[in-house]
Image (cartoon, grey):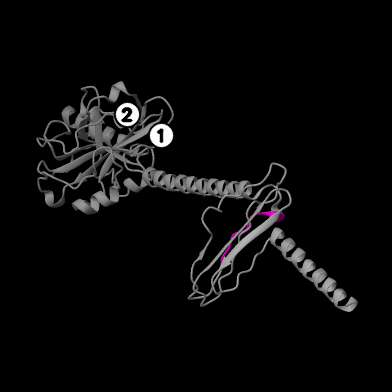
Amino acid sequence: MLRTYLSHLFCTAALLRSAYAQKSVPSDLAVGFDPSSISLQAAYGGGEASEGFTDGTKFTKDQVANAPAFAFGDSSGISSTTKFTILMLDTTCDSARTLHFLQTDFVYDGRLTDLASSANPLQAYQAPGAFKETGNGRQYTFLMYSQPGNQNISSLKLPNQGDIVNVKQFQDDNGYQNAQAGIGMVVDLGGTTNCGGAASSGGASSAAQSATSAAGSSSAAAAASSAAASGASSANSGTESPSATAAASSGTAGAAATTVAPGLTTATGSPGDQSSGLVAASSVLGGSPKTTLAASTTGQAGAASGTVSGTAPATQTGSEASNLSLTLARCVVVASLIAFAGLLVC
């Protein structure tokens, strides 16, 4: 009679404990929980698994350094042949959950409510902090699944160790239904809380940042080249932009090349002459075979000489050339007037 009474008392205590359990388990992971049917217990430090910690218990890093023992919260109605998979997740960050432990083929061993497995863990126990996660109040969750078809499991499709795991994807990939039971704990690891996991959007961001940096460098290089070209142009043309050296050629389809005579590509002038030492410009008309133009100015007087060869007309532009043309025109007019006056005298 006393033994029966104690047995019922033990079961009642287990049920009461399970009623307060799972508060720290994320709600999306607890949708399949039914504490009135089955619950999970875990114990660290070599204690009886059936006397394990309550949900939400806080631990230090040293207290959870080794894998815990597991047990049912209530052994009633549990078959000794029913097989379970138990795993442990870091659930501190909803978007960065990582797998710390997974072992299959747990069965009720008939001793109190203990669970035992003869299978090797598919993910060996990695203590909190093993994946460089830090921070006080980190949350870890143990989940228990019924194995598909109650079959032994020797392999599963799992993420790489330390990678972020999508629990729903894990279940779908391996044929599991929602977890039937679970329990959570809190661990103080010190430092600032981070969201770890080997997989992250850092790689893409870094690539984007590198591309942006490269683009910025290219823009800077282009700007520098443009500035250098502008500087070189200014140096060649002198300080007075209206008298700047001009070299341009334009033509229609079929136009031949325009060539500046060798030996005249470098402008020269006296220190006092800030105007350009070379004025060369040509316009090649469509159909013209080839036009060569060379003009130079020396000294302060700005006297100019030029040679034009080819059949197409050539046009000089620039202030020096314009002044030269105006001077020649005036000379022609004056000479004509003088000649006309001479005729009148005669």
Q: Residue at x 42, y 44 (%)?
A: 210
For label 2, the residue is 129
Query: In the image, what residue type sits under mark 1?
Result: Asn
Where is residue 70, by image quadrant? top left
Report which quarter residue 46 is drawn in.
top left
Q: Is residue 345 left or right of residue 67?
A: right
Residue toward you, 225 or 80: 225
Percent position (x, y) of residue 29? 32, 46
| Of pointers 2 and 1, the one earlier in the residue sequence | 2
In the rendered image, residue 221, in percent from the top left (x then y), is placed at 50, 46
Residue 153 figure quarter = top left
Residue at 31% in and 34% down? 17
How would you classify the magenta stretch by its main secondary structure? loop
Residue 30 visible in image: no
Q: Amino acid at mark 2?
A: Gly
Residue occupying image coordinates x 77% and y 70%: 332
Marks 2 and 1 in Cβ contact (< 8 Å): no
Q: Which residue is mark 1?
A: 194
Q: Where does residue 287 sit, x and y in percent of width and height?
A: 51, 78
Relative to 9, does residue 158 appear above or below in the rendering?
below
Q: Secondary structure at mark 2?
A: loop
* Image quadrant where one finds the C terminus: bottom right
**What is the C-alpha distance between the residues marked 2 and 1?**
11 Å
Q: Quadrant of the N terminus?
A: top left
Q: Is 248 covered by the magenta stretch?
A: yes
For the magenta stretch, what is the residue range? 242-249
In the rendered view, would you say 296 is above or below 114?
below
Expressed as whole percent of the image width and height from the top left, the position of residue 88 reads: 26, 37
Residue 183 seen: yes
- Relative to residue 290, is residue 102 depicted above or below? above
Q: Is residue 178 above or below residue 189?
A: below
